[in-house]
Structures are given as C-alpha cells and as structure tokens.
Image: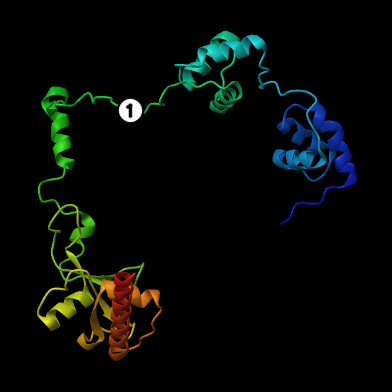
Amino acid sequence: MRPPRWTPEQDAWLRESYPVTPRLDDLAALYAGAFPEPRTPKALRTRAKVLGLRKAVRCPHRHAWSGDRAEWFKAFCPGHTESEISAEHARLFGSPLTKSQVGNAKMRYGVRSGTVGGRFEKGTVPPNKGKKWADFMSPEGQERSRATCYKPGNMPDNGARLPVGSERVDSKDGYLWRKVAERPSRPDCNDNWRLVHHLVWEQANGRPVPPSTMIVFADRDKSNFDPANLVAVPRALWVRITQLRMEYGDRESLEACMARAALHAKMGEMKRRLA
C-alpha cells in the first residue's frame, strides 16, 4: 500500500516545525497530533530533504566539536582503540562517542588510531608456538580437543558421500566427471576425478591421452560417448581451428578441420623461414 500524498497543509506544517524540532521522534509525535494519518520519522526526514529544509537547532546528543575538543581528539586518537577513545571522551566531556562518531572524527581531522582492531599484527608470534598441549591445557581440555581433532586418514563428509564410480556434471562447461579413486595422489591435485570421455577414449585406444592433446566430441554432443565420436586433437591444431572458426559436426568434418589447420600451420612456418 502506497503512503498518502503530501498535501500543501502538511508541507507548510513541516516547513514550520522541522527546523525547530531537534528530534525526529518528537517531530513524528507532533505530526500525529496534527494530522489523522501518522508518518514515520524516516518519512518526515525524506520529505524535509525534498523540500530543502535544514535544522535550525541541533539535537542534544550531537556533539559540537569545539577547538579544545578537536585538539584533544587529534592528540589522544593515535595509539588508542575506538572503545578507549569513547571512554576517555565520556570521562572528560560527560558523554561517550559512538563508533560512527569516532570514525567520522578520524576522517574529518585526518588522524588514525594506528591500532589493528584486535587482529594479529604482522610478525606476531603465537603464544602457544613450540608448546605441547600439556604446557597450556588442562587434562580435561586435552581430552575434549582430541575428540574433535582430525585423525590420520580422515575423510571429509563430502568425500565420504561420493564413493568411487560416482559421476557429476561440471556446472561450468557441462563435461561429465567420474570418481576413479578414493583420494587424490597428492594433496595439491584432484586426479581422483577423471573426465568420462577421456576414460572412454583410453579404453577404446588402449593408451593414455597423449600430452597436449584434447579429446573432442565430433558432433559437439557432450553426452555422446561413442568411441567413434571422440577424436584426439593436438592443442596446437585446436588453437587454429578455433582461431579460424572452422565448423564441424561429425568425425569426418572434424578431421578435415584438423588437416586444414595443419596446412595453415605449415604455411605459417614456411613464411617465417622465408622472411
């Protein structure tokens, strides 16, 4: 439901009341007493901005930064956290500062605390470095920690849910992958998953996929794993095929594209020799 439109009488009231009423909550209460349909403080502030109105008096919780207070802030801020600045301001001037007020004052006066906000500084040595659990943990704490530690050979939940032989489709390129081993051969790789069309090609040809070679679906259908549909294309030729935007739709046309790409590569090589 859309809010009611502003009437000329309401605008006139707002022009008269907004500048002299410090708090928006008080302004909303006065508005509710003057008109049958109340409006939120946010709605009143938005309408005042549309009308170009400004406050003639400051809200009591706003701090007027006198010269002395500004000089104190610039001198005290370096090396102190926001909570320390707020507490010291409350001690000296009778009221704390909010986090936003401290941040705005830093920006206004061009000063920085120089603290890291509770984060570890670069080069910090952990307090438990080089220590055993017994040096800083109680026997009860050690037992609780052991119960939640990863054990040697631990299998993550997502790995345990997918046994060897499971298959998944890559959401990015649509290729089908199959899990061929429980774990990768090294921690920094995922060779326990293989592309299914590579496995089919290797089984049909009795050898691994050659280095720097792609296995291409001749009919462009990534679900057609017929060995006759899988063609080994050297990457050097595949670059030429894509650069020249050669079209293919079956094994014969793909092999023709490979021959044409090889011819272009040979022509380029001869031109470089004659240059």
Query: Left of 32 or right of it: where is 161?
Result: left
**Residue 118 seen in this snapshot:** yes
**Residue at 90% of width from left, 43% of height from top?**
9
Q: Is residue 118 above or below residue 87?
A: below
**Quick one: 258 or 269, which is closer to the camera?**
269
The answer to whether residue 175 is visible is no
Please give the count of numbered marks on the rendered protein: 1
Q: Quadrant of residue 74?
A: top right
Q: How is the image coloured?
A: rainbow
Tell me where residue 195 appears, x and y as whole percent.
22, 71
Q: Residue at x 57, y 21 (%)?
A: 97
Quarter holding residue 105 = top right
On the image, the x and y values in percent for residue 70 come to 61, 14
Answer with left or right where residue 69 lies relative to residue 262. right
SS label for mark 1: loop
73 left or right of 181 in image: right
What's the residue at 12%, 58% (across, down)? 185
255, 161: nearer the viewer = 255
* Quarter of the image with the C terminus in it: bottom left
Callout 1 crowding tier (Cα within 10 Å): few <14, some 14–19, many ≥20: few
Query: Height in image: 173 above or below 13?
Result: below
Q: Quadrant of the N terminus?
A: bottom right
Residue 255 vertical position relative to residue 101 in the rendered view, above or below: below
Question: Mark 1 is on which residue type?
Answer: Phe
Q: x%, y% of residue 120?
A: 33, 27
Could you say where residue 213 lies in the image, as x and y percent from the top left?
A: 22, 72
Q: Residue at x 83, y 48 (%)?
A: 6
Q: Which residue is mark 1?
A: 120
